[in-house]
Amino acid sequence: MDLLRARWRDSDTALCVGLDPDLERMPDIALRGPRPVLEFCCNIVDATADAVCAFKPQVAYFAALGLEADLAELIAYVHARHPRVPVILDAKRGDIGATARLYAREAFVRFGADAVTVSPYLGLESIEPYFDYPERGVIVLCRTSNPDSAWLQNYPEDDPVYLRVARGVAKWNTHGNLMLVAGATYAKDLGRIRSLVGDMPLLVPGVGAQGGDLEAVLRAGLDGNGQGLVINASRAVLYADRSADYGMASDAAARALRDEIRRLQVEIAPHGAVV
């Protein structure tokens, strides 16, 4: 959280770039090296680091190819080259007991992530093992950006699951290291979450390719300081261009989105807020 708030303050950016390397969408030039996924992601990291408050590699894109070692090296690379930028491991783990403790160890010891996404479906006991790492962030799924999420997360109508999750996580946040996932595609619900959790940071997927309304997200989700959001973009930045200049194109896409977020923050933030 200290790293994240320092990025908001010192680099004036709420943009998170998701690292979801898809071999079918990567530029041809990126596929020619001996370790194309690692090299592509490292190039994206170097190209966009000045514009982001965090990076968010998705485990499945690496694990499906048997590239967990590349994932660990990528996170170590970010820490070495851009030590002020935190890394969120997008794993969405959700289990109990010894299994949950091993998932926590995987995220924080094996991969060295600064934070990890987790599912609350099995209750508090599925999240508690991560509390053994109070210096790391735990980001709990709350109101996700996918269309089918309402089937579960918006019921029952009088006290929907996503609000129960938000209240629970706010109560459990004794170390100040918890966050929530609140999708950009449901800005009204994001606003209800903000009203319950105060200044707790929110990870917001769904801007860009998923069609989330950036202005609506900022109006609903900024905290009392005009900050509090980690707005993720993946495909729109990663695959901005398939030419040899893909790094420059990703940099331009990231800066454009960061600047639009900045503009809206200044317009929307409460009078006197720090932005």
Image (cartoon, rainbow, N blue to C red):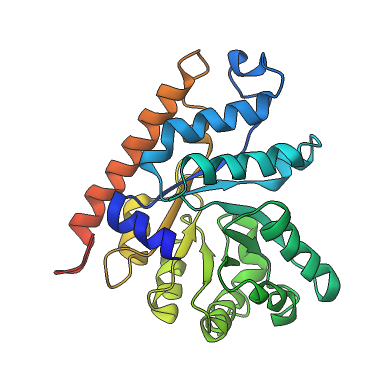
Q: Work out which quarter of the rendered image holds the C terminus and state it.
A: bottom left
Of residues 111 and 150, which is closer to you in this image?
A: 111
Q: Position of residue 166 (x, y in %)?
A: 53, 77
* Residue 155 vertical position relative to residue 64 in the rendered view, above or below: below
User: What residue lies at 41% left-to-right and 66% top-to-bottom?
Assistant: 188
Of residues 47 and 82, which is closer to you in this image?
A: 82
Q: Position of residue 116 (x, y in %)?
A: 62, 60
User: What residue lies at 62% left-to-right and 80% top-to-bottom?
Assistant: 156
Most distant residue in the left direction: 271
* Residue 132 vertical position relative to residue 181 in the rendered view, above or below: below
Q: Place residue 77 in its image quadrant.
A: top right
Q: Position of residue 49 (x, y in %)?
A: 42, 39
- One can see residue 254 in this view: yes
Q: Place residue 141 in its image quadrant.
A: bottom right
User: What residue lies at 43% left-to-right and 59% top-to-bottom?
Assistant: 3
- One can see residue 209 in this view: no
> Could you tell whether 224 is left or right of 164 in the image?
left
Q: Position of residue 274 (x, y in %)?
A: 21, 64
Of residues 171 and 141, which is closer to you in this image?
A: 171
User: What residue lies at 64% left-to-right and 54% top-to-bottom?
Assistant: 112
